[in-house]
Amino acid sequence: MATINKAATLAIMSRFENKKILGKVLLYILTAAVIIGTIFPFYWLVITSIKYGIDMQTSPPIFFPSRVTIENYINVFKTGLGKNLANSLIVSISTTFLAVLFGALAAYALSKTYIGQRLRNIFLLGVLVIRIFPPVVTTMPYFLIITRLGLYDTQISMIITYVAYCVPFNIWLMLGFFQEMPQEIEKAAIVDGCTIWQRFSKVTLPLTLPGLAVTSVFCFIMAWNEFLYASVLTSKNAKTLPVVVGSFISDQRIEWGSMTAIGVMLVIPVLIFAIFTQKYLVRGLTFGAVKG
């Protein structure tokens, strides 16, 4: 009898182990499929940018080209791409800095009791309504305002527009981080004699670096990839890379080589920016800061 029970137990354990191994295999297959599906578009973008023109039109497509060229990159830089790249960098970095700064200041104020609850709710609701508007609805008002201010086709006009578009999102995103901040930390700063600005800049802000990192990444991506406002508010001097990409599409042909070359250059700065902020993306820096 004991032998039979032991054999049954071993059979059940063996079946359990087999199911566990099968589950792991399926998980690995699913993970590999997701990774391939995520990486393949970028791989295809890079491969297309270094193909010869005739290799782009072949059917079936060439996944592993035997010959490559950097002619597409040379051609796009000959068109004055350096200036457009500088415009994108200046506008995106400036927008990110100002939008995160203004959004953090507003979110910090709204997370405290300095403002009445009803007034805070009205302000937050107004900010949310502004953010809900589709960009195409506000394009013409921005165009008229920027034109009358004499800022058309300037980097300043792009920065003003992008900051106004990003700040509402930043306020709502940063508000949660400030509200989760343990109140004991700020009370300790008050006891030490810190002013409200010192509490914000030296105590609260360093502890919300994860929130600042996430907000900065979203702002940078938005400003870096934005096309609608950039195409309406610029013509030549302040033109950014997304607008340049659109110029390679005409009623006669699509210049895939030039478009993919610029596409690679559009992706690389975002990747670099995300890598530098990666260590701050994990939340939880304030856990354990206050001990009883």
Image (cartoon, grey):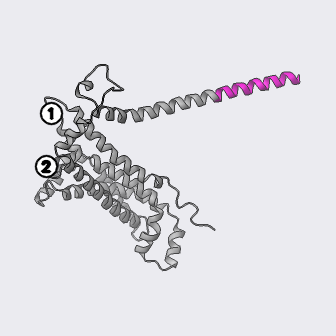
Q: Earlier in the sequence, mark 1 or mark 2?
A: 2
Q: How crowded is the residue under tag 1: few (<14 C-alpha within 10 Å), some, or many (20+)?
A: few
Q: Which of 213 and 105 is in front in this view?
A: 213
Q: Is mark 2 on a helix, strand or loop?
A: loop
Residue type (three-letter) at the residue carrying disc 2: Lys
Circle 2 residue = 236
Kind of residue indicated by mark 1: Ser
Tell how many labels.
2
Residue 6 in the figure: left or right of residue 209 = right
Quick one: SS at disc 1? loop
User: Is 16 one of the magenta-colored residues?
Assistant: yes
Residue 250: assigned label: 1
Q: Which of 45 and 64 is in front in this view?
A: 64
Range of residues picked out in magenta: 1-20
Q: Can residue 236 be seen in this view?
A: yes
- Left or right, 34 with respect to 14, comes to left
Residue at point 36% right, 51% down? Answer: 218
Residue 130 image position (x, y, % from top left): 28, 54
> Up-down: is 203 above or below 56?
below
